[in-house]
Image (cartoon, helix red, strand yellow):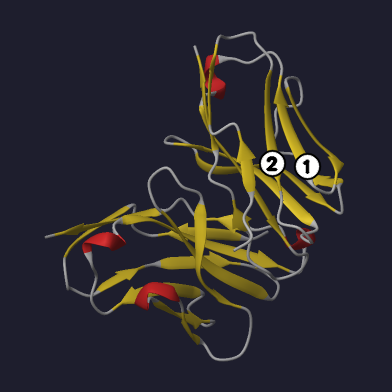
């Protein structure tokens, strides 16, 4: 079964540090999504790529967050500098363009101390 | 603009009882509807989807949902739940506009009691 792979699964770091989260989408999928999940806000869309080009990153704090797809097999989400309020579970999902479901990774659980 | 409302944040139910998780959506264009399930420490998994055709959609684990265009609803049902169905359930809508961006509801936590 093809899966979306996210690394690391857990990350604990101190505020001010740079955090990089990685995602390997399912081979052949041309859309990639980054979500953040917290108890208070639920599931929030941060960024959305199609064919490696960013389509929508309106949900992402631009001053500290950045998302890229250096190639079709890798998506990255960076936070610099990190803050305690960034503590959350970050999910990557991939899919095919159109009315198709998304396939989620197991997430990166991020704790900023 | 599209939106999704899950009417119950938590639903407690006894094992082997039926359950319905409610979902209403709003959209000005053709919609595609999904239910996902999230188990602890995991990502979301697709339960079922409605793209077109029959309004009654069957999914995995014995779940089904009915698309009701006049009521703008897509409620999820299971005739007899198991302890293992305890999880968070998300309703989601996608459409032809916005690049098929998917909008998720806030989630409903189903808690199955013995």
Q: CA distance from mark 1 to mark 2?
A: 6 Å
Q: Earlier in the sequence, mark 1 or mark 2?
A: 2
**On residue A74, which mark appears?**
1
Q: Chain of mark 2?
A: A
Task: Examine the rendered structure and indicate whether residue A84 appears above or below residue A108.
Answer: above
Disc 2 marks which residue? A23
Left-right relation of A56 to A44: right
Residue extending farthest to the front is A1
Q: Is residue A57 visible?
A: no
The residue lying at 37 percent from left, 73 percent from top is B61
User: Where the N terminus of chain B falls, by quadrant?
Assistant: bottom right
Q: Is residue A67 visible?
A: yes
| Percent coordinates x, y for residue B113 in the rendering | 15, 58
Task: Examine the rendered structure and indicate whether residue A30 appears above or below residue A60.
Answer: below
The residue lying at 69 percent from left, 48 percent from top is A33
Left-right relation of B41 to A107: left
Q: Secondary structure at mark 1?
A: strand
Residue B37 occupies quadrant: bottom left
| Percent coordinates x, y for residue B104 in the rendering | 55, 55
| Percent coordinates x, y for residue B89 in the rendering | 41, 58
Left-right relation of A63 to B62: right
Task: Examine the rendered structure and indicate whether residue A21 appears above or below residue A42.
Answer: above
Q: Secondary structure at mark 2?
A: strand
Kindly indicate whether the residue at mark 2 contacts the one at mark 1 (C-beta within 8 angstroms). Answer: yes
Q: Nearer the viewer, residue B7 or B16?
A: B16
Left-right relation of A100 to A36: right
The residue lying at 49 percent from left, 82 percent from top is B68
Q: Chain of mark 1?
A: A
């Amino acid at each position: 079964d093809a899966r979306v792979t996210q690394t690391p699964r857990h990350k604990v770091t101190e505020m001010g540090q740079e955090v990089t989260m990685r995602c390997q989408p399912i081979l052949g999928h041309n859309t990639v999504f980054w979500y953040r999940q917290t108890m208070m806000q639920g599931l929030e869309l941060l960024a959305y790529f199609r064919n490696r080009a960013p389509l929508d990153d309106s949900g992402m704090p631009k001053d500290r967050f950045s998302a890229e797809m250096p190639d079709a097999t890798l998506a990255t989400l960076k936070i610099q500098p990190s803050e305690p309020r960034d503590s959350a579970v970050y999910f990557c999902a991939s899919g095919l363009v159109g009315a198709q479901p998304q396939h989620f990774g197991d997430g990166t659980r991020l704790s900023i101390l | 603009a599209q939106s999704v409302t899950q009417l119950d944040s938590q639903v407690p139910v006894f094992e082997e009882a039926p359950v319905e998780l409610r979902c209403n959506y709003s959209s000005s264009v053709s919609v595609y509807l999904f239910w996902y399930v999230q188990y602890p420490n995991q990502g979301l998994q697709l339960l079922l989807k409605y793209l077109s055709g029959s309004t009654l959609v069957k999914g995995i684990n014995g779940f089904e949902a009915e698309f009701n265009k006049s009521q703008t609803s897509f409620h999820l049902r299971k005739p007899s739940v198991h302890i293992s169905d305890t999880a968070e359930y998300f309703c989601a809508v996608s459409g032809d506009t916005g690049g098929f961006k998917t909008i998720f509801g806030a989630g409903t936590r189903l808690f199955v009691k013995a």
